Structure formats: structure tokens, C-alpha cells
Image (cartoon, rainbow, N blue to C red):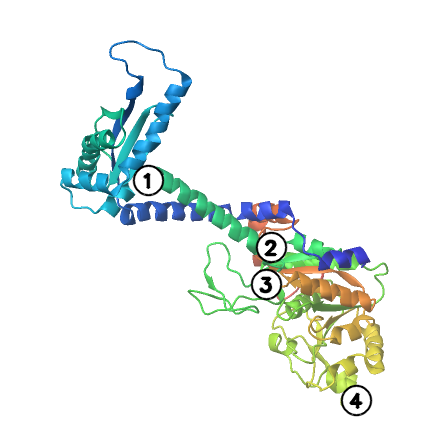
Amino acid sequence: MDDKMIQKNEEVEVDLGRLLQAVWRRIWLVALAAVVATAIALVGTLMFITPQYQSSAKFYVNNGSLSLGGASISLSASDISASKGLVNTYIVILGTRETLNDVIDYAGVDITYTELREIVTAAAVDNTEIFQVTVTHPDPIIAEKLANAIAHILPKRIDTIVEGTSAKVAEAAVVASSPSSPNYVQNSVIGLVVGAVLAVAAIVIRELVDVTVRAEEDIARVCNHPVLAAVSDMTAPAKGGHYQRAGYGGRKQPADSQQEPKLIGNDISFAASEAYKLLRTKLQYSFADESNSRVIGISSALTGEGKSLTAINLAHSLAQLDKKVLLVDCDMRRPSLSTKLPISKRPGLSGYLTSQNHLDELVQDCGIEGDEYAFKVIASGQNPPNPIELLSSARMSRLLGKLRDAYDYIILDLPPVSEVSDSLAVAKMVDGILLVVRQHYCQRPALGAAVRQFAFVDGRILGIVYNCTIDDSGHYGYYKRYYRKYYGRYGHKYEGSYLATKKQPTKTSEKGSE
């Protein structure tokens, strides 16, 4: 891997197109959040906001110094400006304690001066000599009484304070027929916008902080190795099924059944079987000389990505070509082949590497009952205290040399490279390495670190096995949808006919034919 790719892995990139795609994929969530927020805003407005009613009285400012009996005069701009300036003076007079107390006494309403001052507003109308006084109150009748009380009291107060001017009532207040607030439509629209914005923000933040691999594009951002196959989640329910998730490795069970889904050999789903056949075919094209025996290591960045199941099913798929296949459990810290296959853990690889067992004592049948495409297995053996020293020993190298003479394909189930360095010790002894990447589980920094570690020891990475895919993301999304739609029935017929053929006393087709 070159320096540019390594630098790219260490940088945090913000891809606007990716963010838009993430929002679009979850547009239903944005719509749902908008609807819920709209409902909350509407219900909250109805239940917690008291309706308010407004009554208004309008006053005309009369500048007495400009009135000369019945004579008609023309007003200059300065005269009109002086009249407009009186509006602010009258509004100040309206807000005085004495004026408002007189208004309360005249209206006969049980309200304090402070409360009245908070609900009374006054302003000029369109920058004219007319100003409007508005009273807002939950009771429309009280609002009307107070507004008309102001219309009665204010002109008298102005006459006693400002000489030569007056304020005349231009329009009396009336009882409001509908509330002025709250605005149900406006609040609902605000709720809708806020809900949608919060949902989009949550999706964008999750996209920026979530470093798990969720699509094949995530793999391409980390490394330049090809995705050789995308294996669907074999523990996921079929369309219309109901499974309870309890972790990886066949722990999901149908809600109405105690039978675990099959994950190994001929019992896996048709789609998964085809994915492993695709992986098998691409592996054959990865080697120039097919006549030589091939040693393939299978590892992953993290524990729990399905590398052991991948190794088992790849070995089974290669055995279908009438090839001699050997599967070796090189994970001597947390071995799992003996738990997934009906084989004995001991004697195994560790016993041979410590000179406790001979080679002919190690090899076991895979133990898959009724499977004619059997392969051989070497278990891990007893867990040693120094697995990395054993795997990097000359005895391990000589063992692989002997096995090459007896088998066409040797599959090594290696430990996760980002957690222990055992895989790096074997990397130079194999012809190629497959990295298993589990969707919605493996993290991009961990995958990048695994790729860099193999590159550091000159390990040849053949490609990526994209495991446990549960959606149509990635380069093959359209193909998957097309394939399921038009070839789903063929898959069921194929499985049925294949099982029926296995029950025949004699084989009618050549082993390994496809």
C-alpha cells in the first residue's frame, strides 16, 4: 500500500455526497421525525398554551397649534413630523401608573397595574398620526373592557398634561371573535421543520462518528483490495420470517421454532452457497499456475467477523470441485473449528509443532454427516503458552511443505490480525490471504490497520470477503435485487433437486460438476 493510501486512512474525510446518500437512505426516519414533532407541537399548543384575545382602539393625534378655526391651511413636512412625534409622547403617558390605575378603576376589572402594563401595547399605524392601543387577555370581554377604558381615560389624561394638543378616538374596541394566539398552523410547521432538521442532524452526526463498515464503499475508502464475494447473513431470517438476534455464529432462532439455521456445507442458503462458489472461482483466477498446491490464510481485523465459518465453507466449496482440501486451525489462542465441526480438538497442530504428535495422527475427516464433498481437518490441539513462536518456527514451514505434496488447497484459519500478531508470523508462508470483513461490525480504522500490518510483512492479500451482509448496499446491490427476483425460485428448485440426488444409491453425475 502506498503512502497516499495510508495517509487517506488516517484522515477524517467529509464526503458531502455520502452524507446526502445517508440522509436519503433514511428519509423515512426524517419523515417520521417530522410527523411526530408536528404532532407534539400541535398537541402541546392545544394543551399547554392558553388562547389569547386582542381588542384594539385607535387614536388620532391632533396638534392644536395647527388649527385656526375654520380656516384651511396647508401643513408642511415639519408640521406633520411634529404630529407624529407626539405619538411617542402619548404612548409614554399611557404607560404611567396613574393612567393605568384610572383605566383599571373605570373598567372595573380585577387586575394589577403591573399585569395591565404587560398586556398593553401601543404603536403608530403605518408611520401616520394615528396610533393603536392593543390589549391582550385570555378573556375577550375583559380585553374589550380594558381597551375601551383606555379609549375613555387616555384623551383626558393627554389634555391635562400636554397643552394645545389632543388625542381623539378614531376607532373603539370590540370583542374579539377568535383568538389571536397561538397560531396552530405556524406552530405545527415549526414542529415539522424542527423534527426534520433534528433527524437530518442525527443522521449526519452518526455518519460522521460511525466508523463501522456499512457498505462496500467503506472498504474501498480504506484499502484498494477487491471484494471477492459478498456473503449474506446466513443467520438472518428470510423475507417474512422472525428471528431473535443474540449474536453471531448461529445464535439467532426463529420465534416459532427451536431449530438453528444451518451455516455449514450443503445446508446453507442458496444465496450464501453461490457467494462461496463465486469466491472459489475468483480464487482460482488469483493464481497463475493452478497445478501447484495453494495455501490460503483466512484472517480478519477483529474477533467475531466469521473467518472460521468462511474457512469451513470455502473448504467445502473447493472440495466440490473434486479437489483435495485440508483445513487447518491455526488459531491456537481461541480455536473454534472443533466447536463448529464434529471433530476432536486434540491431537492437533500444537501437538505436532511441539513434537508430541506425528503428522498422520493429526488429520481428521470434517465430520459433516452425509456430505459426499468431504475435506480434511487439522484441529488446533491443546492451547500452548507460546503460539506465535510455534507458528513462526521452521517446523511449521516444513509442515506446510509436506502438506503441499498431499493436497490441492490448504486453508489456514488464522487469528484476527489486529488483536494478536500470530497471523503475521504465517503470512510469508502462505500464497495469499483473505480478509473477512463483517458488515456493521468491523471498524474502518481496524481494517486499515490490518491491511497495513500485512503489507509491512509483505503478506499478499488476495481480496476481501464481505461477510454477513444484510442489505443491498455496495456495488452489487442492483445485481442482488435482480438475482433474488428472477432466480429465487430456481434456487429453491436447485436445492431440492440436489438433496434428492444425494439420496440416490448411485451418483448420476460426476463429482464436482456444476
Dot 1 or dot 4: first in sequence order is 1
Q: Is residue 265 left or right of residue 511?
A: left
- Residue at 73 percent across and 66 percent down: it is 450
Q: What is the spatial separation of the Cα atoms under label 1 and label 4, in whole angstroms? A: 83 Å
- Residue at 40 percent across and 40 percent down: it is 189
Q: Which of the numbered marks, if any, corresponds to residue 152?
A: none
Dot 2 or dot 3: first in sequence order is 2
Given residues 255 and 144, the one toward you in this image is: 144
Q: Which of the numbered marks, if any, corresponds to residue 268?
A: 3
Q: What is the spatial separation of the Cα atoms under label 2 and label 4, in whole angstroms? A: 52 Å
**Circle 4: element type:** loop
Dot 1 or dot 2: first in sequence order is 1
Mark in the foreground, 1 or 3: 1
Q: What is the spatial separation of the Cα atoms under label 1 and label 3, in whole angstroms? A: 57 Å
Q: Amino acid at mark 4?
A: Ser
Task: Classify residue 444 by image quadrant.
Answer: bottom right
Dot 1 or dot 3: first in sequence order is 1
Q: Which of the numbered marks, if any, corresponds to residue 355?
A: 4
Residue 96 location (% of width, % of height): 27, 40
Label 2 belongs to which residue? Answer: 208
Q: Residues within 10 Å of mark 2 (few under 14, many from 20)?
A: some
Label 1 belongs to which residue? Answer: 184
